[in-house]
Amino acid sequence: MSPADPPLHPDACYLALKTRDARFDGAFFTGVTSTGIYCRPVCKVRTPRRENCRFFALAAQAESAGFRPCLRCRPELAPHALRWSVQDATAVLAQQAARLLDEPEAWGGEMPTVERLAQRLGVSDRHLRRIFETHLGVTPLQYLQTRRLLSAKQLLADTRLPITGIALISGFGSVRRFNAAFTGHYGLSPSALRREGGAPQATCEVRLGWRPPYDVDAMLGFFRTRAIEGLESVTDRQLARTLALDAGGQRWQGWITAGFDEAQCQLVLRVSESLHGVLPLVIRRVRAAFDLDADPHAINARLHGSFPLGDGLRVPGSLSGYELAVRAVLGQQITVAAARTLAQRLVHRFGAPIETPDPALHHLFPAPEVLAAAEGDALGQLGIVRQRQAAIVAIARAVAEGRVTLHPGADVPSTIAALKELPGIGDWTAQYIAMRALRWPDAFPAGDVALHKALGVQQMKQPAREAEAASQAWKPWRSYAVVRAWSALSQGA
């Protein structure tokens, strides 16, 4: 844990454990020395005695200390702990290293190693290991192995995927290596854990946790007003949509549904069988799209004074950074409804048809290669002006050629710079993409007109500069400040 982060106070952790407070889910784990098991703070088993409890900031720390994950509360369901520091450079580096290990898309299909990680961060292997252990208490390999094992554990419990397939898609090079690691860490084989956990669902249903408060209505409302007919549908407490992604040298396509179980603070994710081979990647994208790993306590500590009505708001993400970038261009300087109309035309003209059980879902978003080859006249016929035609084609080509990667594992400053070099992409669009596609918590589109109005600076001589100055008090959570400002404006607050 970073020195910039508050240390764990055992007595406070024990109080949270006794109350089973979901606000602390994923913020720490409890190892029980009398059983050798570690649990989430929300575990419903009988509360252990205080002298038998040890507290850990990360699941990897608990496993490194010899504890096994609880089969009842299932630590793999807990929201991830995302910490951001603007003070300690080595802490920032350690957190960035952990963030890269968490993002499968950051590696372009390669297996992450300490050597590759150090090279990506521009430091030596030895320095990386030292700062990682200093700030997180485990080695990079221990951290990565815990992530892989917990991912595999979730798939064993929630799906009917064969164990061989689970081993490979969880990041293990072979079934033999997976079985050895799993048995060594958890004291039972993968097949035995599947039997102990009960029979998995007939359909693939995965539960993903979050920390309250969470404004479900605001999140679903955001997606509902932007939903493209044929591509996505928002009904009651659920979002359904088609999805295509590239992984392992092939293109995968299918559909997902995501519904909210507010009583359990969980998102219930159902995934089509055609996407089971990339299920960990789908789960990561869904967690990012619904901002499930946000820490409201840290965010509200900085923002509540300025935006007291937005404590449960999250930053809506996207299941495809490329798709988000195209839709951001379509939305430049026009209303949300007009942007949705243009996006709908684009999907129906260039998107591939797909069969799903839901008649409302019948098209995929156009692939980068398709829009990269689109003629200007074809885009113009949809009502897209020439400047945005050029921007859409440029984004599609940059993504298709691998010159720009738009996912949470991408380097933010270099990606923003690369985006702004493309025709028709200014600072507003680049910051908006960073906020929603790159999941950068400190993005700030200072030139946004609605933001100027919300902050009361629209009549000033240089509103963008005034907005930027006001935003300094909200670092490093300015993306959340933007969402709260937009929400306050829409509610007339």
Image (cartoon, rainbow, N blue to C red):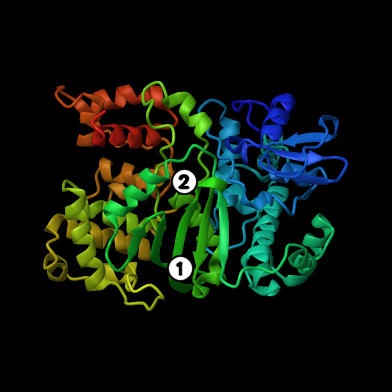
Q: In this rendering, is residue 19 above or below 364? A: above
Q: Looking at the image, which residue is at 68% across and 39% down?
A: 41
Mark 1 vs mark 2: in front: 2
Q: Position of residue 45 (x, y in %)?
A: 75, 44
Q: In this rendering, is residue 461 above or below 211? A: above
- Counting every numbered tag in the picture gives 2
Quadrant position of the C terminus in the picture: top left
Disc 2 residue type? Asp
Say whether residue 399 is left or right of residue 326: right
Say whether residue 489 is left or right of residue 400: left
SS under mark 1: strand
Q: Looking at the image, which residue is at 34% across and 62% down?
A: 233
Residue at the disc numbered 1 = 246
Q: Looking at the image, which residue is at 14% across and 24% down?
A: 459
Which of the two discs, 1 and 2, labels the residue nearer the N terminus?
1
The numbered mark at residue 54 is none
Q: CA distance from mark 1 to mark 2?
A: 22 Å
Disc 1 residue type? Asp
**Dot 1: few (<14), some (14–19), or many (≥20) neighbours within 10 Å?**
some
In terms of image quadrants, where is residue 347? bottom left
In terms of image quadrants, where is residue 310? top left
Q: Position of residue 51 (x, y in %)?
A: 85, 30
Q: Position of residue 457 (x, y in %)?
A: 20, 24
Say whether residue 372 is left or right of residue 163: left
Asked whether residue 142 appears in the rendered view, the answer is: yes
Q: Looking at the image, which residue is at 45% across and 49% down?
A: 290
Foreground residue among 353 and 99: 353
Quadrant position of the N terminus in the picture: top right
Residue at the disc numbered 2 = 291
Q: In this rendering, is residue 54 above or below 163? A: above
